[in-house]
Amino acid sequence: MSAIEDIFWNARGYCENIKPSKKYFEQLEKCADLSEKLGEGLNEEQMNLLRELSIEHGGLESDSNLSHFSEGFKLGLTLAAESFLNK
């Protein structure tokens, strides 16, 4: 099976090979601290809204990341095809 078929059929995963950067963990810690500080002044209803907002924002980020990956993947395939066709 080719690498493209592996990816298409989800037989090959690359996510486990992605290592978050030091900056990622620093930002994650900042987000946790800010969320905790904000949560201290909120009532239960407001806290639930904050959690829901955070979940929805995560969904936006996930969708955006998938779109960027998809475009990068298509560009990579286009560049590979052009390099073989122009030989």
Image: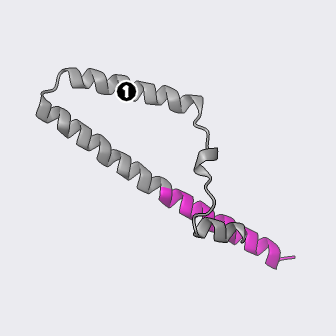
Q: Where does label 1 land, which residue?
A: 32
Residue 48: which quarter of the image?
top left
Magenta: predominant secondary structure element? helix
In the rendered structure, which segment of residues is drawn in magenta?
66-87
| Picture coordinates of residue 31, whole percent (x, y) | 38, 29
Left or right: 87, with 41 as reference point: right
Q: Tell me the crowding category of disc 1: few under 14, some 14 to 19, or many 20 or more residues within 10 angstroms, Cα based.
A: few
* x 49%, y 53%: residue: 65
* x 72%, y 72%: residue: 1
| Picture coordinates of residue 12, whole percent (x, y) | 63, 60
Residue 33: which quarter of the image?
top left
* x 62%, y 65%: residue: 7
Residue 87: which quarter of the image?
bottom right
Q: Is residue 32 above or below residue 14?
A: above
| Picture coordinates of residue 63, whole percent (x, y) | 42, 56
Q: Is residue 33 part of the magenta span, yes or no?
A: no
Observer-nearest of 4 and 85 = 4
Looking at the image, which residue sits at the far bottom? 85
Disc 1 element: helix
Looking at the image, which residue sits at the far right? 87
Q: Is residue 80 part of the magenta span, yes or no?
A: yes
Left or right: 28, with 47 as reference point: right
Q: Amino acid at mark 1?
A: Ala
Left or right: 54, with 72 as reference point: left
| Picture coordinates of residue 67, whole percent (x, y) | 49, 60
* x 49%, y 58%: residue: 66
Observer-nearest of 83 and 32 = 32
What colour-coding does the image apply?
Answer: one colour
The mark tally for this picture is 1
